[in-house]
Structures are given as C-alpha cells and as structure tokens.
Amino acid sequence: MTNRPRDRAAMSPAFHYLPQPRNQHFVGRQRVLDSLHRSLNSSTTGRIQVICGAGGVGKTHLALEYAYRNLEQYKVIWWLPSAEPNTLAGFYLALAEQLGAVAPGHNDVQDARLAVCDQLRQRDDWLLIFDDAAGAKAIQPYIPESGGHILVTTRNERWDAALGKSFTLRVLERPDAIEFLIRRSGRSFEPSAFTLCQALGDLPLAIEQAGAVVAAGGISFADYLRRFEDHWAELLQSGRSAGEYPDSVAMTWELACRELEAADSEVAALLKILGFLAPAEITRSMLVRAADTLPAPLSTRFADPAGTDAAIEILQQFSLIAADERAISLHRLVASLTRDRLPEGQRGNWCKVALGMMAAAFRFSAESPATWAECAEALPHALAASEHAESLVVDPATNAKLMNNVGEYLQLMGQYHQARTVLETALRLAEEAHGSDSVRRSAIMNNLGRVLKRLGDNAMAREHFERALKLDQKQYGEAHHHVAEIANNYGTILHQSGDFRTALHQFEWALEICLNSYGPSHSKVASVTNNVAYALANAGDVDRAIEHFTQALSTAEAAVGPMHPMVATIRTNLGIALRLKGQTDEARAQLERAASIGQAALGPDHSDVARSLSQLGALHYMQNDFQLARHYFQRALEIDEKALGKNHLLLCARLNDLARTLKAIGDVDASAACYDRGAQILRANNPVIPDEPVSQPA
C-alpha cells in the first residue's frame, strides 16, 4: 500500500483529479498550448505528448493549464506524480478505485494497473498526466495501449521516441515574463521589471519566487533587483555552485528563504525539516501526528492543527510549497536547494529531526489495521528520510528501528521483495549502531527471516531465525516473550522442512511463554495456538488440531477483531482440518469466510488470499466439481505469480493442483503444460517444494 490522494474536492463525479487550483497568474504559452491540443487530437501526430525541459521552466504549470482549459473534453483527468515509484503506484491505485476498476482498499498495484489499462483502452474520453517522469521505462507499464490522451513532463531531454512525441519547453518570452511578474507580485508596471526579468533569465520558477517575495514584503522591483545583485556578488565571491539548477533559481530561492527567516524563523525551521522528506504529498494530519518530535517551540506550535495551517499559509505566501486542504507538497528543486543551503554542520541535525519525525509518524502495528493507512501515507517520506540519514551517517539506531517498522509493514502488505531490501538495510544500520552481536539486531533478523521464508529462501530464513534465537536466549534466557516470538517463527521453518515433531516442540515452548507473558486472551497466544494446531494436523491428530484451531479463532477474534488477516489464516487452517475430517460443508464455510476476510483486509491479490482460494479448490476437487476447482486453482496461481514471482517454488504446488484438475476435465495439453512448467521451476531452484505458509507469526 502506498500514498494515495483521498477525500479531495477535485475528485468530482466527473473523475477529475488535479493537485492544484488553476494558476490565476498563468500567462503566455498560447502557441504551445494550441500545438499540444492539435497534436493530441490528431490521428497522425500521436496521443502521447512529452514536455521536456530543465527544472523550473514551467512544465508542470503548462500541463495543469492544458488540463483546466480542456476540462469539458475529458470525463476522466488524472494527475500522476511520477518522480517516485511508490507515489506513482499509490495515485494509480486511487485512479483504479475512482474508476471502479478495483474495490476500495485494494493494494495490488499490478492488478490495478492491468484493470485500469483494460478499462481505459476501450474509451477515449480521458487524459492522464505523468508529472516529472524520470524516463519512459518508469511509466510505460502504466500507459494504456490505446484510447485517450497522455501528457508527460520530464527533465529527461533524451526521451525514448517510441513512447510519445517530445518537445523542449523554453523560458518565457520577455513580454510574457514581465506580465507574469506583475501578476504574481500584484504591482503595477515599473521599468525595472524588464531588468529584473532579464536578470532572472525569464525562468518561470525564478519569476514566481521573486514575485512572491515582492508581494509578501511590499517592496519594489528595483528593491528586489538590488538584493538579487548583492546575492549574486556573494555567490560569485564564495565560489559556491548553484548545483544542477540555474543560478537564478538558487538566488531567488535564497532571497525567499531570507525573507521567510526574517518573517518567521519557526516556519523557516519547518521547511528545513521538510527538505529531507520525499517529493510527494505530505498530509497535514501526518505533520500534526509527529509534531511532538520536533524541537521546542516547534513542537508546541505545530501540534495544533491551526498552528500547522498558519505555517502552511506563510510558506504559500513565499511560493515555497503547493498546498490544499489535505496536504502540502514541496517541489523537488525547493527540497534540494533547502538541503544544499544548509551549512554542512547543520545538515545532519535537521536530517535527524526529519528522521525522528518519520519514526513517530510511521506507527505500524500488525494488530491495528487503523495504522496501516497512516503508514501508506508516510511510506515515501520514511524511505526518503532514511536514505538521507544513511548518506549523512545520522542516528543509525533510529534509522534501523524505522526501517524495521517499514519492513514489517511491507511484509504484511505482501510487498516481499521491497520488504527484504528495507530489512537488510535495517540490519546493516543496527550493526553500525550497536555492533554485530547486539540483541537489538534480533528483531530485525526475525522479520527478515519471515520475509525470506515467504520468498522461498528457507535456508537463509532458518539461518536468520537461529542467529536471532541465539542472541535473545543469551540476553533474556529461555522464558522471555522475545524468545517465544523467534522460537515460533523458527518452528514454521522446521515445519516446512517436514520436521513436524521438532516444530511442534518449538510451538509448544513458544505457547507456554506467551501464556505466561501475556495471558490467555492475547493475539500472540492465538497465533501460536494456531501453529500448534497445524503441527498436530500434519502429525495426524486432526481432532486435537480442530480443538486448538477453534480456541485460536475465538481468542483471535476477541483480541484483534473478526476482520483481521490473522483470523483469515486461522479460518483457512480450520477449514483444512475440517476437510480432512470429512466435514466438507463446515470446511467450505470456513474457507469462504477466510477468503472474504483476506480480500477485505489485504486486497484480493495477497498471497494469503491465494492460500484460502487454493484450499477451496482442493475441497471442490475432492467433490469432483472440477470446473469450480479449476477456477480457484487458476486464481491462486495468478495471485502468487504476482506476489512471489514467476519462479517461486510455491508455484509448483499451484501448478500441480491445476494440472490434476485440467486432466480430470479432459484438457490434457493444458495439464501437461502445467506439469512441464512446474518441472522447469523445480530445475531452476532444485530444493524441496515448500509446504503452505503455516500462519501469521507471533
């Protein structure tokens, strides 16, 4: 799950989403706008138009103006911030929901992408705008192959011509630049406006910032020009480069920051913190939620929503952010220049504040679904703050803790490959902070082991569990709840390897500790009881297994609610045991309920949902209902291919089930193809086929 635009006024029944109101100061570009309209509506010049150009030249505002001028032409207009993959994915998921292509709360980006593309290619009344795309490869999977129109903005002037006709946007013509400066500043024409625009290189972003400072400070163009020239002399004397941006942008930005610091030093401090977050939406609620991590007096001022709103208004006055009633966004150039202008000795300090802010904002709890939406909002910012902190060697202990939480969240959401990368980073940071033998690394090892098990790397998962268990036993002894958690997860690896007796011993050990540590009503007791039951079922003691599953289900529903993914897992396992007992009607009810809960909590394309569907397939196969069995097996295969990859060993079991069913139906060729593909996966991996996942770990 990733950041999504929600509850916006712009999300009207006409399905228009644009991130900002129409720019009332927009001037010029008439020939470019006319050319765009002709090209997009021509059958020969192409439905994809790419606006290339340097930072600050006005690409985004040109795309916005085109959209607002042509609202009536399109039933669907959707803005897709494309600089950061998680953000693009989140906004695409929101588009899928608005179109009704997926259910609300759906988490699978791949499924949403296919659903949206399939729906949009059948109509031509839509416009998608990919803003700040790094290159064609990043956005190509999201582009429907036919229908509608597409606008792309990019700084990449070597755009792949196979994906759209590109042109380079230049600075404003001088008369338009002067008119823009006058409109933005609210002042009448002065002769010095010409000289100022010349000094700014007619660059829209520089003129925007200059006009904002003139308006906020009530100064003349000549006054601003003098300050600009003084700063230019400072820049030349210092020998400092403006970086990847034109000098005019760096200098207007510097002057805006100086005016802001003079007007309100606390708001200026907030901007320095925001510079270490991602170029994505920052919700007002997230700022308020993490306010108490800020240094005083910022913590007091921004803990109040009214104080946060007032600060945002000041930043808007100086044209340093874009904002609406729900969120703000910091231009990538502004964020970069904010960091660059900080003295070297201060960068680490402000980055540390941003990191602490995200550690507070990213409040993930597997037991509390209410935290999952907050984590989706915070995800790109947590990753950005972590990356800056690692680069500056800032507070690796806090960074490791944050990345561990992010990894847990991604694991629950089924983003296993990204979770692995994040948790490996967390483990490296924890070693840097605490040393290789610190017990503080054990929780990260445990979480990484869980992800590796999901990805089919059981040998590496077992190694991580064993190392974590050794660290915890040394630190806490044999009866601590930390030890129980790892012992339980270690048991799942033993179970998958077929060592059911040792696995049962691990589960029973973990259960005894959890009962003593938490009492009989805790969710961790439910989870481990479920694993005990699963081991009993595989050992042939189905009656005791059903008793334990029933107890685990009752405990879990009371502890985390009836719609939690843990409840779905236990119901799936109970359904398996009831099927083994021959109670097929009761088994079907449990499995169908499990699939329903899983889809509602995690989305229809999570691997846990695939497991429930596969077991439904097995039940219908046993009853000779081969067509319905085929449906469930096929769907489970499709889900696991997306979630785990096309060469995961678990697919062998899925393919084998589907092959048997196809053979029973009489489709021998399709059956043989499934068997052949399963054999290819086995040859590529060459270990033992893993058993189904046992449960949500304790």
Image (cartoon, rainbow, N blue to C red):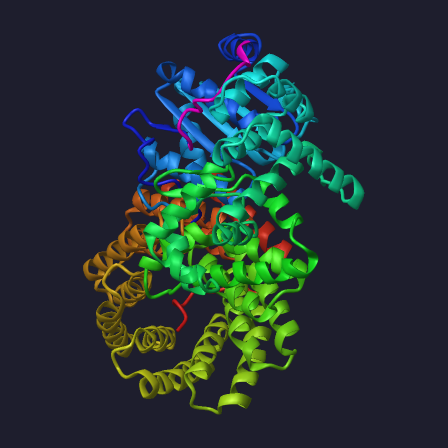
Image coordinates for residue 334, horizontal then vertical, percent: 58, 41
**Residue range highlighted in magenta:** 19-30
Q: Which residue occupies the foreground of this view, 448 or 289?
A: 289
Q: Residue at x 46, y 37 (%)?
A: 317
- The extreme left residue here reads 585
Asked if the magenta segment contains residue 20, the reply would be: yes
**Foreground of the two, 41 or 157:** 157
From this view, report whether residue 62 is shown above or below residue 268: above
Please state which of residues 448 and 656 is positioned toward the viewer in this rendering.
448
Instruction: Count the numbered circles shown.
Output: 0
Position of residue 116 in the picture relative to residue 420 (left or right): left
Residue 190 placed where, x, y %? 57, 18
Location of residue 99 (image quadrant) = top left
Identified at 53% across, 36% down, the residue is 82
Residue 278 is situated, as x and y percent measured from the top left of the image, at 54, 47
Which residue: 44% across, 36% down?
92
- The rendered magenta stretch, by its main secondary structure, is classed as loop
**Is residue 328 visible from the viewing direction of this image?**
yes
Say whether residue 461 is left or right of residue 564.
Answer: right
